[in-house]
Image (cartoon, helix red, strand yellow):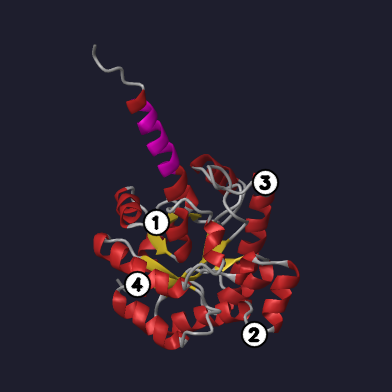
Amino acid sequence: MNRQDVLGRLRATVAAGRPVIGAGAGTGLSAKCAEAGGVDLIIIYNSGRYRMAGRGSLAGLLPYGDANQIVVEMAAEVLPVVRDTPVLAGVCGTDPFRVMPYFLDQLKAMGFAGVQNFPTVGLYDGTFRQNLEETGMGFDLEVELIRQARERDLVTAPYVFDEEQARAMTEAGADVLVPHVGLTTKGSIGAGTALSLDEAAARVQAMRDAAVAVRPDVLVLCHGGPIAEPEDAAHVLARTEGVAGFFGASSVERLPTERAITEQVRAFKALRPGA
């Protein structure tokens, strides 16, 4: 599926008054179920593997594996089972061991429709983040990743964390911008520290406004922090203007899985064998 086809679908969804929904998939089963539910985009990145292994999503930002190689491995599980939904690859744009133009060509040849910048240094702050920027491993490399992906006619759906990044990614050619408002809350391994929903809505709106000032046709989806359940997304969408939908990873695959398996086992344990 080429970029024009994907964007045509997404814009038709918006024109019909329906939300655009993206879903992270850490397993083939997650991808199959998301597609069966009608998802518009599927994104696979290394945190999905850790998340569905019962570890926190931030494991994807720590030195537990080669993020870009993990995505290639996950592709063999996910791409063959997805029938008609565009699949995007989470790419670590700061990886100093990848020749990025070649790697993007490889991902496109494998069947990926586009990319997202993950793992991202946008989730780091403080002195550590400053040192990353100072030593050539900063967010500008992620912007360049999106620019190079756009040149290859790949769909681009980058995470951004503030208005400056929203402008930079839009200038680089982002098709779908995803304002990220923090690690997703709730569930057994969700974050305990987060913005309020109203604060999240304000942050998303500010990033959306910065992006459309650069290019009005960019699509914007909200993600992360307290936006964990459908009612949370509804709250944010009702309090923002021009936000087309929601992207969920933990929200789509981890939280429902935790609930479903727990309740299924409880139901079995409630059985009473005959005398």
Q: Is residue 263 magenta?
A: yes
Amino acid type of the residue that numbered disc 4 sits on in the rendered structure: Phe
Q: Is residue 101 magenta?
A: no
Q: Earlier in the sequence, mark 2 or mark 3?
A: 2
Above-or-below relation of 208 to 196 = below
Q: In this rendering, would 217 be left or right of 272?
A: right
* Mark 2 element type: loop
* Mark 1 element type: helix
Q: Earlier in the sequence, mark 4 or mark 3?
A: 4
Q: In this rendering, would 239 be left or right of 20?
A: right
For the residue carrying disc 4, how many other residues have a C-alpha within 10 Å: few (<14), some (14-19), or many (20+)? many
Q: Earlier in the sequence, mark 1 or mark 3?
A: 1
The residue at which mark 2 appears reads as: 136
Amino acid type of the residue that numbered disc 2 sits on in the rendered structure: Gly
The residue at which mark 1 appears reads as: 13
Identify the residue at horizontal 40%, vertical 68% (top origin).
Answer: 88
The range drawn in magenta is: 256-267
Q: CA distance from mark 1 to mark 3?
A: 26 Å
Q: Give the foreground label among 2 and 3.
A: 2
* Mark 3 element type: helix
* Mark 4 element type: loop
Q: Give the foreground label among 1 and 3.
A: 3
Amino acid type of the residue that numbered disc 3 sits on in the rendered structure: Asp
